[in-house]
Image: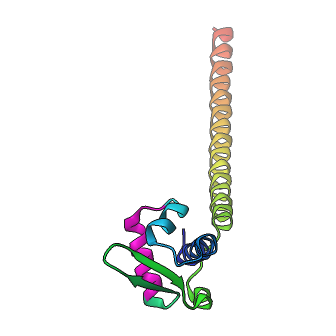
């Protein structure tokens, strides 16, 4: 998942939990709702606090979160959609396969021509031998 999507999910989880409880949610609750490990949640939280998207208030037992400037999320880099890169990879694979198929067809045609020439040579030698046999 890219940073842009992670930030949107994190902020949305904070807003939902704040709406449900009426107070700033704990980091553990945000991680629970997003199905993230607490360690990954801490890392993401520190990154968002550093950027200024989220504010944190720490007490000895927990970290409470609030949304600071959600508009800064738009400055985060967005990942290229998986579908377009997958489509490009598929197109590249198909063009490479087409090239390989053309090479195989060319080799098969060349081998068929060689086989035909070989049979023609054998047939010509056979006819010479047959004529020699008839003359003797």
Q: Quick check: 2 left or right of 82?
A: left
Q: Main secondary structure of the magenta part?
A: helix
Q: Residue furthest front?
A: 22
- Indicate the quadrant containing the N terminus: top left, top right, bottom left or bottom right: bottom right
Q: How many marks?
A: 0
Left or right placement of residue 64 versus residue 14 in this view: left
Identified at 68% across, 19% down, the residue is 127
Rendering quarter of residue 28? bottom left
Q: Position of residue 46 (x, y in %)?
A: 40, 81
**Front-lying residue, 92 or 75:** 75
From what the image shows, is residue 103 above or below residue 10? above
State the residue in front, 3 or 90: 3
Is 12 placed above or below 109 here? Answer: below
Colouring chosen for the image of the structure:
rainbow
Which residue is at 42% across, 89% downward? 50
Which residue is farthest left? Answer: 60
Q: Give coordinates of residue 75: x percent, y percent.
A: 58, 89
Residue nearest the observer in this picture, 117 or 135 = 117
Give the x, y percent position of residue 73: 59, 85
* Location of residue 130 by image quarter: top right
Q: Which residues are magenta?
A: 36-49
Q: Residue at point 68% right, 60% down? A: 91
| Residue 114 drawn above or below residue 31 | above
Give the residue at x 41% y 67%: 40
Is 41 situated above or below 47? above
């Amino acid at each position: 998942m890219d940073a842009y999507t992670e930030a949107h999910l994190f902020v949305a989880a904070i807003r939902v939990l704040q709406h449900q409880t009426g107070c700033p949610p704990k980091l553990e609750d945000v991680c629970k709702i997003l199905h993230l490990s607490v360690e990954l949640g801490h890392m993401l939280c520190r990154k968002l606090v550093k950027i200024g998207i989220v504010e944190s208030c720490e007490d000895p037992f927990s970290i409470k979160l609030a949304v600071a400037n959600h508009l800064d999320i738009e400055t985060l880099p967005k990942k290229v959609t998986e579908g377009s890169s997958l489509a490009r990879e598929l197109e590249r694979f198909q063009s490479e396969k087409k090239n390989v198929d053309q090479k195989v067809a060319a080799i098969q045609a060349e081998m068929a021509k060689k086989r035909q020439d070989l049979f023609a040579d054998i047939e010509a030698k056979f006819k010479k031998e047959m004529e020699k046999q008839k003359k003797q």
